[in-house]
Amino acid sequence: MTLTVKCFCGAVVQTASEDELVAQVSAHASSVHDMDLSRTDVLAMANNSED
Ligand SMILES: [Zn+2]
């Protein structure tokens, strides 16, 4: 399973676990965009693909 989030700025974060995805996307949002994303926000942005 691969979880992918594509940020509105074009950055793509791809991980194999939800915890990792939330950590990486939260770090990106807070450092680049000064945004505070919750776990729910990150997972709502994620595309879940089975390959
Ligand atoms: Zn971004």
Image (cartoon, rainbow, N blue to C red):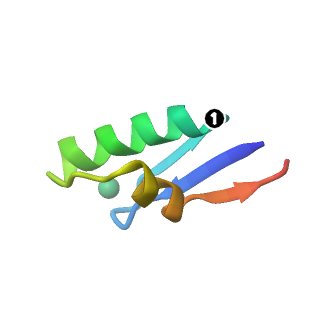
Work out whether 33 lies above or below 16.
below
Q: Is residue 49 left or right of residue 5?
A: right
Work out whether 1 lies above or below 34.
above
Q: Which quarter of the rendered picture does the N terminus lie within?
A: top right
Residues 43 and 10: in front is: 43
Q: Provide residue 6's location: percent of width, then percent of height.
A: 49, 59
Q: Is residue 1 left or right of residue 18?
A: right
Mark 1 burial class by Cα count in 10 Å: few <14, some 14-19, many 20+: few
**Disc 1 on helix, strand or loop?**
loop
Residue furthest right as drawn: 51
Q: How many marks?
A: 1
Q: Provide residue 7's location: percent of width, then percent of height.
A: 41, 60
Residue at 45% x, 41% y: name it: 22
Q: Is residue 33 left or right of residue 20?
A: left
Q: Quadrant of ligand 1?
A: bottom left
Residue at 63% x, 35% y: name it: 17
Residue furthest left as drawn: 34
Q: Provide residue 13's location: percent of width, then percent of height.
A: 50, 45
Name the residue beneath numbered marker 1: 17
Q: Provide residue 34's location: percent of width, then percent of height.
A: 14, 51
Q: Is residue 38 left or right of residue 30?
A: right
Amino acid at circle 1: Ser
Residue at 67% x, 35% y: name it: 16
